[in-house]
Image: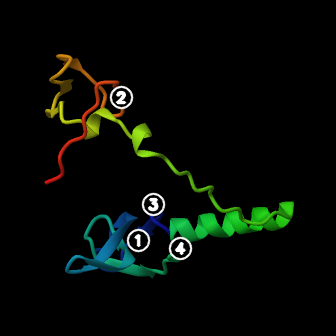
Amino acid sequence: MKAGDTVDCPHCGKSAFLKKESVMDGWTKTGEILACASCGEKIADLKEEIVTKSAAQSEAAASLASLLGTEKEEAPKIEVSEEEKQFCRDCSHFIVHPFLTRCSLHKRDVNPMDDCPDFSRKESK
């Protein structure tokens, strides 16, 4: 049986569809059941396989690596000097507003990731 199948409900006697419902214990999901769409009574339990998305992806990546005969490579470490980190979001002239972001020095709209030759770093609180 699966959700959407038609069944004669043993509780209400009507021909109805099965619907999948979550069984909750407070805010924690404890399982899933198939219930009658007409009366809402439990018809059967669903056994769920809990496979996280990251576990499935890592398993797929491992099988692909074994197929290609490659090993997992580490991401290269990139070192950036302080002179290259002159983004508008870190500037003392940057004005944050819910609808737009402005530069108080140049009196114009800016992107937080823009860079400017007139950069002056914010003082940390």
Give the distance between the C-alpha atoms of the residues marked 1 and 2, in whole angstroms.
65 Å
Above/below status of 106 relative to 31: above
Residue at x 29% of width, y 30% of height:
119
Dot 4, crowdedness within 10 Å: few (<14), some or many (≥20)? few
Name the kind of residue labelled 1 in the image. Answer: Asp
Which residue is the site of mark 2? 114
Q: Nearer the viewer, residue 45 or 5?
A: 45
Dot 2, crowdedness within 10 Å: few (<14), some or many (≥20)? few
- Upstream in the sequence, badge 1 or badge 2? 1
In the image, taking residue 104 as reference, residue 120 lies left or right, namely right
Residue at x 27% of width, y 40% of height:
90
Which residue is the site of mark 4? 51
Q: Nearer the viewer, residue 32 or 60?
A: 60
The kind of secondary structure element at disc 4 is loop
**Which marked residue is nearer to the observer: mark 1 or mark 4?**
4
**Which marked residue is nearer to the observer: mark 3 or mark 1?**
3
In the image, taking residue 21 as reference, residue 96 lies left or right, namely left
